[in-house]
Amino acid sequence: MQAELGVGPAHDVLDAGCGAGRIAVPLTDVLGEKGSYLGFDIVPHAIEWCSSAMTPKYPSFRFEHVDMRQEIYNPDGKPRAADFRFPAEYSAFDVVAMVGLISHLLPPELDNYLT
């Protein structure tokens, strides 16, 4: 998996729209003690499950709920997707995954995420 994804034991991974951890679970076998994973999503129960099921066993895997406005999944959320900033203390990651999220963004929102 390491060569296929380009992810190694010391990489820092950001998973935008991590859901229930479909990307995180296989990365538990790849990321070492020097690596880290930050997943965020707008669906609270997905983040709660990941935080309770994965973080205790893999402390370098963190999950955060963001209260972003999204018409279908979180219509009462606060910021619009176009105004959203990643919830990270630093802005450099070795790998950024947007597997589920990218299909839900409009072009201006996608520009915001990728720049």
Image (tube, rainbow, N blue to C red):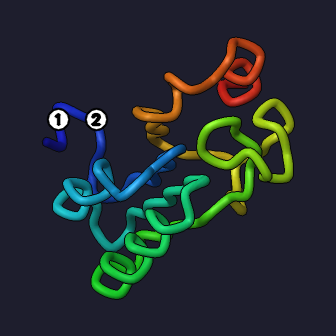
Give the residue pinned by disc 2.
6
Image spot of residue 56 (x, y percent)? 35, 87
SS at mark 1 in the image: helix
Q: Is residue 4 left or right of residue 9?
A: left
Residue furthest top in the image: 107
Residue name at image x 28 percent, y 50 percent: 22
Give the residue pinned by disc 1.
3
Specify the amino acid type for callout 2: Gly
Q: CA distance from mark 2 to mark 1?
A: 5 Å
Specify the amino acid type for callout 1: Ala
Residue name at image x 44 percent, y 63 percent: 46
Residue 32 vertical placement versus 68 (above, below): below
Image spot of residue 42 (x, y percent)? 61, 53
Other residues around mark 2 within 10 Å, as few (<14) / some (14–19) / many (≥20)? few
Work out which quarter of the rendered image holds the C terminus and state it. top right
Q: Residue 34's image quarter? A: bottom left
Residue 110 numbered mark, or none: none
